[in-house]
Amino acid sequence: MSVSIHLPVANLAATDQFCASLGLTKVLSASGPAVSTYTLSQDTRVVAHTMESFSRTLREGDQPDRPSGARQMFVTVEVDSATAVGAFVAAAVAGGGQVYRFPLEESRGRFTGAVRDPDGHVWEAGYTDPSVAADQPWT
């Protein structure tokens, strides 16, 4: 199974810069003037649409909206170390993001940090230390 996460964006060029700063690979064959597709992992893609493009995918009178404080979902990228959590946040900020949650150890052995992309979507980096993960329930 593969997963595609579709996000409406106001400025595709700003999103391209943000995604490039995270080291995501742009899929040129699935991108165009109104859509940028990025590989997040082997089976996961992030698809950024201009508002007009995103509107064409919606039904029943739904319209895209920019995040306004109510968070329905966020994207978590699992990284290889606690240090990589901080590096992810720093790279995202350098690419136009804003810190949403500074990197921290949120529970024993679980490290996270999060940023808002230029459109306000929240991207979290996470790492769970395998030496302590086995003895803890998922929370």
Image: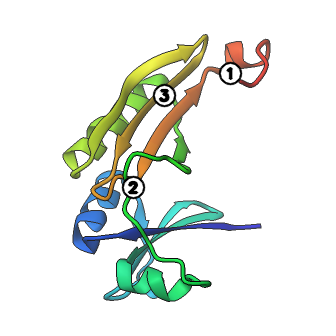
Residue 30 in percent (x, y) is at 48, 84
| 26 shown above or below 111 | below
Q: Of the residues under marks 2 and 3, which one precedes in the sequence?
A: 2
Residue 66 in percent (x, y) is at 37, 62
Q: Indicate the secondary structure of the residue bearing disc 1.
A: helix
Closer to viewer: mark 3 or mark 1: 3
Q: How far is disc 3 from disc 1 in space, using C-alphas?
A: 15 Å
Determine which residue is flagged by label 2: 67
| 82 shown above or below 1 | above
Check the picture and name the quadrant holding the N terminus.
bottom right
Residue 48 in percent (x, y) is at 42, 71
Q: Indicate the secondary structure of the residue bearing disc 2.
A: loop
Q: Which mark is residue 130?
A: 1
Q: Callout 3, which amino acid?
A: Thr
Residue 95 in percent (x, y) is at 23, 51
Q: Residue at x 47, y 40 (%)?
A: 124
Q: Callout 2, which amino acid?
A: Pro
Q: How far is disc 1 from disc 2 in space, using C-alphas?
A: 34 Å
